């Protein structure tokens, strides 16, 4: 059954209104009409089986048949802090980590980032585009939420934010001792996980010193160095397998 996302403002006790770009897709591509059924998600973890009762050029009205909690969301919330890569790589990262169950992606400005994004309109334009990519990937993979793409952070802001997680770590190519599995199993009853991935050029030595001085663990991903667009999805998949819902 086709699945689409709406905001909670578009849902009442008995009805759902679809007034996004999906209207054209539903009416012209899928050719659905009055009496047809589809699935709507409120982006907060609940799915609604609905029946179309009225169609307009830019709006579709539906009656709610059934409301259920989404079964596709993982039992842990994982946030990826991603050192800003080139545009196509960021889009790939958003798509693949959304499919694997990420909850939030935070772009991070680090010293070796090739991409430079100015605060203001440039940043908002980028984030709006990335959010649409997240929504598209969430639809395709049957997610119960659309992972949030947050505003760009500095390393200092990431370090401060790391205190909010049950578990936070940084994969680093020069780490030789501490392994991912070891740190994933070091804390019990983990509900929130965060990790920081460096950009194409990796971390500057001053950045890793700052990270370690704040008590944040760096971990190794093995003997092979992963690309920035590979590392995030690899860490997420391993985290979901070890302490999440992939088993």
Image (cartoon, rainbow, N blue to C red):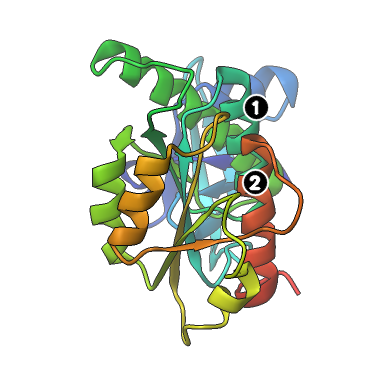
The C terminus: image quadrant: bottom right
Q: Is residue 84 left or right of residue 141?
A: left
Secondary structure category for the residue under label 2 = helix
Q: Is residue 222 left or right of residue 71?
A: right
Q: Residue at x 76, y 49 (%)?
A: 224
Instruction: Where is residue 39? Give x, y as percent.
Output: 62, 48
Instruction: Where is residue 83? Give x, y as percent.
Output: 46, 35
Q: Is residue 30 left or right of residue 93?
A: right
Residue under label 1 = 26
Q: Residues within 10 Å of mark 1 (few under 14, many from 20)?
A: some
Compared to residue 108, the image places residue 190 above or below, namely: below
Q: Is residue 161 left or right of residue 84?
A: left
Image quadrant where residue 137 sits: top right
Q: Residue at x 35, y 54 (%)?
A: 211
Residue under label 2 = 231
Q: Nearer the viewer, residue 36 or 225?
A: 225
For the question of whether residue 37 can be seen, the reply is no
Q: Residues within 10 Å of mark 2 (few under 14, many from 20)?
A: some
Image quadrant where residue 106 sits: top left
Image quadrant where residue 133 sits: top right
Residue ranking furthest to the bottom:
188
Total labels: the figure holds 2
Residue depth check, mark 1 versus mark 2: number of the one nearer the observer: 2
Q: Nearer the viewer, residue 60 or 106?
A: 106
Q: Residue at x 36, y 16 (%)?
A: 117
Instruction: Where is residue 93? Give x, y as percent.
Output: 61, 36
Distance from the alpha carbon under mark 1 to that under mark 2: 36 Å
Mark 1 and mark 2 lie on one chain; the one further toward the N terminus is 1
For the question of whether residue 86 can be seen, the reply is yes
Q: Nearer the viewer, residue 171 or 147?
A: 171
């Amino acid at each position: 059954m086709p699945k689409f996302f709406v905001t909670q403002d578009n849902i009442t006790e008995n009805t759902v209104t679809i007034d996004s770009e999906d209207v054209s897709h539903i009416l012209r591509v899928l050719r659905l009409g009055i009496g047809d059924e589809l699935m709507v998600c409120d982006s907060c973890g609940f799915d609604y089986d609905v029946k179309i009762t009225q169609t307009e050029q830019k709006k579709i009205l539906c009656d709610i048949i059934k409301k259920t909690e989404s079964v596709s969301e993982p039992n842990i919330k994982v946030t990826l802090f991603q050192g800003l890569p080139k545009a196509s790589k960021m889009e790939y990262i958003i798509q693949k980590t959304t499919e694997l169950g990420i909850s939030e992606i935070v772009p991070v400005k680090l010293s070796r980032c090739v991409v430079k994004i100015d605060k203001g309109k440039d940043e908002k334009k980028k984030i709006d585009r990335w959010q649409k990519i997240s929504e598209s990937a969430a639809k395709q993979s049957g997610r119960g939420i659309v992972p949030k793409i947050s505003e760009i952070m500095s390393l200092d802001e990431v370090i401060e934010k790391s205190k909010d997680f049950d578990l936070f770590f940084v994969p680093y190519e020069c780490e030789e001792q501490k392994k991912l599995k070891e740190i994933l199993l070091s804390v019990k009853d983990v509900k929130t996980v965060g990790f920081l991935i460096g950009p194409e050029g990796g971390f500057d030595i001053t950045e890793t010193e700052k990270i370690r001085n704040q008590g944040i663990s760096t971990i190794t991903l093995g003997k092979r160095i992963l690309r920035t667009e590979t590392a995030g999805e690899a860490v997420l998949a391993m985290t979901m397998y070890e302490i999440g819902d992939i088993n």
